[in-house]
Image (tube, rainbow, N blue to C red):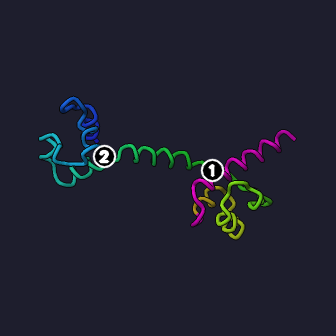
Amino acid sequence: MEWTQRLEVERRAGESYALHLRRSHSQDDFPQELKAESKEVRGEVHYRVVFKGYLERERKQIEKMKHIDHIRIPDDFTYANVKGLRSESAQKLIEIMPRTLGQANRISGVNPADISILMVHLEARRANKKKA
């Protein structure tokens, strides 16, 4: 969006409009040209500028997790032996027996930290099998 980029570059009182907006959260501080835009445009620009860091972090997390649908969980994988995995998650995983990390990630009660722990254990297991 053109406005979000402009606000990152254009300056007011020694700082970018974007930085000022992230601090004040006030649309009153928009440049006059942006104030002339529709309420919807101003709202979208405000949201994208103020929450830029959060949106970028979420985008990276989504990108990082895309590949987990292709990571298979062996049928003989023992969730109870995974150190650091919450017992609630282990119970749900044992009950449902997902075939991939992507499926495990979509189980209610299994959080991203649990998925990361499982990923580490699956990688270690794969590495140990290659050595043997």
**Is 123 included in the stretch rendered in magenta?**
yes
SS for callout 2: helix
Q: Quadrant of residue 97?
A: bottom right
**Circle 1 sits on which residue?**
116
Residue, far right: 132
Q: Which residues are magenta?
A: 107-132
Quadrant location of the N terminus in the rendered image:
top left
Q: Residue placed at 18% from the left, 33% from the top?
A: 12
Residue type pointed to by label 1: Ser
Locate the C terminus and report the quarter of the image it occupies.
Answer: top right
Residue corresponding to mark 2? 50
Three-letter amino acid code at the position of disc 2 = Val
Q: Say which residue appears at 13% left-offset and 41% top-offset.
A: 33
Does 3 appear in magenta? Answer: no
Where does the image place residue 76, in percent across and percent down from the top left? 80, 60
| Few, some or many residues within 10 Å of mark 2 (<14, 14–19, 20+) | many
> Do the numbered discs 2 and 1 sit on residues whose CB atoms are within 8 Å?
no
Q: Is 2 or 82 nearer to us in this picture? A: 82
